[in-house]
Image: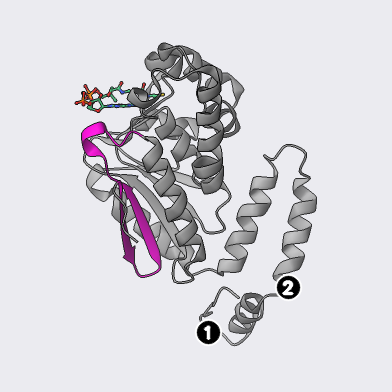
Amino acid sequence: MSYANLLITDTDSIRTITINRPDQLNALNRATIDELDKALDAAEKDKTVRVLVITGSGPKAFVAGADIKEFADFSVEEGKALSADGHKKLFTHVERMNKPVIAAVNGFALGGGLELAMSCHFRVASDNAKLGLPEVGLGVIPGYGGTQRLAQLVGKGKAMEMILLGSAGMIPAEEAIQWGLVNHVVPAEQLLSTCMELAGKIARNSPTALGAAIRAVNAAYEPGADGMQREIEEFGKCFGTADFKEGTSAFMEKRKASFTGA
Ligand code: COA
């Protein structure tokens, strides 16, 4: 499948999705969100894909936010629908993928860009990256999960400060790593290779166990979900998979496991 606003590259079992609107700093318009929705579905179904990396095109931005030009004249109802639609198609969709998704943050990650990075399972940033939620300076609030996921990742006080400061609250990658907002900071030219290296190590593990681990960790942040109970269920289900038989047999036979994801 080809996309107007995305580039898709497969390297072994790792799929890289590059948001490709560099002249607009990869701002998320609705067409791009729709394409990301489809690209995530396609990656989820494709058994040859084990890990995803999401990044932005060009040297300047991961994603500079939702497309301000597109929503500037929206009504209350349209604003609400924009947020709900984005949650469903992209942000919750990424978070609930059954394959690990790494954000390769290659520059500005602002507004919806930081919200996208936070929806990914973890983040690696280039040393020129800048992260922030400037929405209040536009008269809105983060509407793609930022008010919730930032507090989950860095705590309520830091989240409040970043959100309330708006564009003045933007932080460089070196500070983001101290906050725990990104896991690694690397020179820009090493960003993708670092992500590929991490993705390659993850891809050696059981795909069924990776999916189960994501669901169990996510349960801690789902309103009304019992995380420990979800862990017990997901742990138990692993025992019924071919991957579990393969992983434990390989250990006892002192060989490398070869997982099928079944
Ligand atoms: N939505 C729509 N277009 C955007 C955009 C966004 N979120 N962010 C950048 N762009 C566009 C600019 O309008 C400009 O397009 P143009 O050349 O057609 O006018 C192009 O991308 C380049 O951006 P520019 O502002 O000229 O680059 P800069 O280096 O001077 O500034 C930023 C970079 C990221 C600081 C600045 O673009 C910015 O503040 N963007 C908005 C960030 C934001 O508020 N995001 C939250 C949205 S809810």
The answer to whether residue 145 is visible is no
Give the x, y percent position of residue 209: 62, 65
Give the x, y percent position of residue 225: 76, 43
Q: Which mark is residue 34?
A: none
Label 2 element class: loop
Q: Is 158 a magenta residue?
A: no
Identify the residue at horizontal 45%, vertical 61% (top origin). Answer: 43
Name the residue type under label 2.
Phe
Give the x, y percent position of residue 39: 42, 55
Q: Which residues are magenta?
A: 5-27
Pick whichever of labels 2 and 1 is earlier in the sequence.
Answer: 2
Extreme bottom residue here?
253
Asked if residue 80 lies left or right of residue 114, the reply is right
Q: Is 24 a magenta residue?
A: yes
Badge 1 density bin: few <14, some 14–19, many ≥20, Cα 10 Å: few
**Between marks 2 and 1, how big is the CA–CA gap?**
20 Å
Against 162, residue 95 (above or below) is below
Identify the residue at horizontal 64%, vertical 46% (top origin). Answer: 218
Give the x, y percent position of residue 64: 33, 30
Against 248, residue 126 (above or below) is above
Q: Which mark is residue 239?
A: 2
Identify the residue at horizontal 55%, vertical 22% (top origin). Answer: 77
Label 1 element class: loop
Name the residue type under label 1.
Arg
Badge 2 density bin: few <14, some 14–19, many ≥20, Cα 10 Å: few
Quarter of the view holding residue 198: bottom left
Q: Which mark is residue 255?
A: 1
Against 199, residue 150 (above or below) is above
Identify the residue at horizontal 65%, vertical 75% (top origin). Answer: 244
